[in-house]
Image (spheres, rainbow, N blue to C red):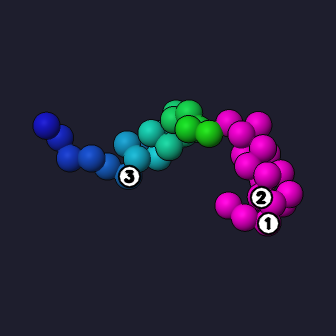
Amino acid sequence: PRDITMKDFRDTILRRKPSVSMDMIRAYYKWSEQFKAL
């Protein structure tokens, strides 16, 4: 196998999908603000 390059890393970062949706982030933030805890 060939060595991994910085281009491989950048390409992967650009193609990956987030593991948490923005809706979930908003819900966690709202919960945190409401209960002052995480």
- Of pointers 2 and 3, the one earlier in the residue sequence: 3
Q: Look at mark 3 in the image and give the residue it sits on.
A: 6
Which residue type carries mark 3?
Met
Q: Marks 2/1: CA distance?
A: 5 Å
Instruction: Tell me the mark number nearer the camera, choosing from 2 and 3.
Output: 2
Which residue type carries mark 2?
Ser
Q: Which residues are magenta?
A: 21-38
Q: Does the CB distance between marks 2 and 1 fall below 8 Å?
A: yes
Q: Marks 2/3: CA distance?
A: 37 Å
Q: Look at mark 2 in the image and give the residue it sits on.
A: 32
- Of pointers 1 and 3, the one earlier in the residue sequence: 3
Q: Residue at x 47, y 46 (%)?
A: 10
Q: Which mark is residue 25?
A: none
Secondary structure of residue under mark 2: helix
Q: Marks 1/3: CA distance?
A: 40 Å
Q: Residue furthest front?
A: 35
Q: Residue at x 83, y 51 (%)?
A: 30
Secondary structure of residue under mark 3: helix
Q: Nearer the viewer, residue 7 or 31?
A: 31
Which residue type carries mark 1?
Lys
Q: Look at mark 1 in the image and give the residue it sits on.
A: 36
Q: Residue at x 81, y 60 (%)?
A: 35
**Residue 38 % position (x, y):** 68, 61
Main SS category, magenta section: helix
Asked whether residue 22 appears in the rendered view, the answer is: no
Apparent side of residue 38 relative to residue 10 in the rendered image (left or right): right
Q: Nearer the viewer, residue 3 or 15?
A: 15
Q: Residue at x 77, y 58 (%)?
A: 32
**Mark 3, other Cα within 10 Å: few <14 / some 14–19 / many ≥20:** few
**Residue 33 % position (x, y):** 84, 60
